[in-house]
Amino acid sequence: MPAQTRQDMYDVVIIGGGPGGATTGTLLKKYSPEMRVAILEKERFPRDHVGESQLPPISRVLDEMGVWDKIEAAGFPIKIGATYTWGKTVDPWVFGFIPLSEVKVEPRPGRYDGWRQRTAFQVDRARYDEILLRHAAACGCDVREGTQVREVLHEGDRITGVRLDDGTTIEGRYYIDSSGNAAVIRRQLGVRVDAPTLLRNVAFWDYWSAPGLNNPIYENGTARVLIRSLPYGWLWYIALSADRTSVGLVTPADYYKASGKRPEELYLAALSQEQSVARLLAHAASRGRVESTNDWSYVAERTHGPNWFLVGESLGFADPILAAGLTLTHTCARHCAYTILEIERGNHDRDWLLRQYDDLQRRRVMQHMKFAEYWYSANGCFADIQENCTRIAQEAGLTLDPQEAFRWLSNGGIDDDIGQVAIGGLDLAGIKGVQQRLSHATDSGVKYKIDGKNTLKLNLIGAEKTFVAALRAGRIERVEAYRRGPKTLIATGVYGAVIEALKKTSDVSRFNDLLRDLLGRRLGPADAPLAYRQAIQCLEVMVNDYWVLATFKPGRPALSVSTPSEGELIYSEHLGPPSSRDR
């Protein structure tokens, strides 16, 4: 090993210059320009990377970073959802972030405004990651490419420095591991990971090109990811431009081993077997290099130490079926930056800040794992997952059949964003719409617990008041919440409006009037209707978790809530959205 040379001192040393490292560094410099931040990246950008599909929460983070306009100017396809062959039928069905009728044909680059705030991108990671890293440098981060960390120096659990290939030692007051699956800090400090799932998949992928390749799947200048189920896994088809696409196969590792086929053989056979993908690629040429990786879900047993944090895939990874990887990374990096900023300000208890980071980030990865298992249960080659989830439910004191067990598990994953009801780009109505599309017998008549009820009683018996972290404009705020057992009820956002209305009345009619009035005064007439729909979904979650007791009393109007089998966001592809069928 080369002899140790000079020591460089920073406030924050970030290992890894991908989206996690670039996001953390950019936000630290935005809100604390005087901080010295180093980003150490072993590769030289641009470089290819898998994981090209995004969800709408990323756009909010990009806007906060001040980089959304640069990403938009790159011309990446606007993602408005996905199409699937998955579940009860072999016919494709569509899931959308927003109704197709709200998509406007506008010149690009566009602004982060209006309907674009509820969309995402499909990105060529070589270009995307480079834009983010160059932006971090422009914001004042000391970006060092071609710089590999060889050793993490530490005394017990406290890091004292990192040693580079050339023998240089870099020191900081904080260290962040955003090195992805390499997990430089996590591995060298011996932090264990838990993989509480039967999903043991492998992925194989390549890139295909042809002039106008993706024109057939563009809709008003936007695109959807194509997910196509196979008897032994599934394919993704992600348009990266009009002429280039990423196509991958995900299959159980055991199936791949038993097949006796080389990755290229298995991959090409899958592409030829799925007719819609085969048609799209009929005149396209591949790059000719099939890559592979393990898609095994995991989460670290802890996310921080005395002066270090795990961010992104070094902290945890959830199966890519929900396209949540980049979302988990960007939002985790944002939370890490906010946590360091608040520790430095000293306005909150340090241990509370660290607990909030650990609790939220581990829970988010676990929730996506659970929801991925629910999704996979509708694919026949993953049937053994059902029995495993029944066992998990029984350990929690519940006696459920496999399908009901999956529904119970998925209900744990609908608080991905504080004060809202969402996971993986789906709100509660979307989750219930997906249930109708999957193959579980008990999902054939998806119902709401609040449907047909007219008396709503807030139930805080046995709950204790607590506080959770809300991230806003570079600061962490302590937001009031209630905790009972493993469940937490946030008293902010639309949840807070529901709680406030329920404290004044238990009558549904009066509750509706109060809720609409509250939301109208707080948000204005333009945003109140959407917030009201979200609030009703929050109410369903509260009833499911016994924060609200819902009953029926004769002689009074009752709530009527349902999810149509054919709606504006989830519908059969050959039929199109209901609003377009009479045209």
Image (cartoon, rainbow, N blue to C red):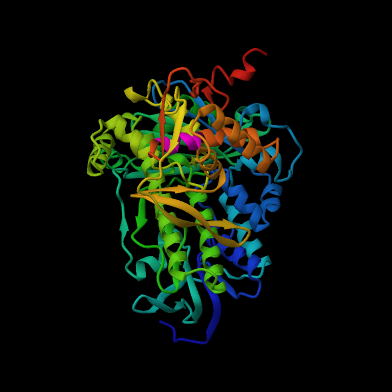
Give residue 389's quadrant in the image.
top left
Judging depth in this view, the residue of 329 and 187 nearest the camera is 329
- Residue range in magenta is 537-543
Q: Main secondary structure of the magenta part?
A: helix
Furthest residue toward right: 107
Judging depth in this view, the residue of 229 and 260 nearest the camera is 229
Q: Is residue 541 magenta?
A: yes
Q: Residue at x 71, y 48 (%)?
A: 73
Furthest residue toward top: 582
Q: Is residue 560 magenta?
A: no
Query: How many numbered circles are shown?
Result: 0
> Quick check: 99 above or below 21?
above
The C terminus sits in image quarter: top right
**Is any atom of residue 384 visible in this view?**
yes
Where does the image place residue 465, in percent across and percent down from the top left? Answer: 43, 54
The N terminus sits in image quarter: bottom left
Where does the image place residue 194, in percent across and percent down from the top left? Answer: 31, 55
- As drawn, is 136 to the left or to the right of 7? right
Q: Residue at x 54, y 82 (%)?
A: 8
Where does the image place residue 129, in percent across and percent down from the top left? Answer: 58, 56
Where does the image place residue 56, in percent across and percent down from the top left? Answer: 58, 43
**Is any atom of residue 242 visible in this view?**
no
Q: Residue at x 64, y 66 (%)?
A: 31
Give residue 525's quadrant in the image.
top right
> Quick check: 130 above or below 282?
below
Judging depth in this view, the residue of 568 and 132 nearest the camera is 568
- As drawn, is 107 to the left or to the right of 582? right
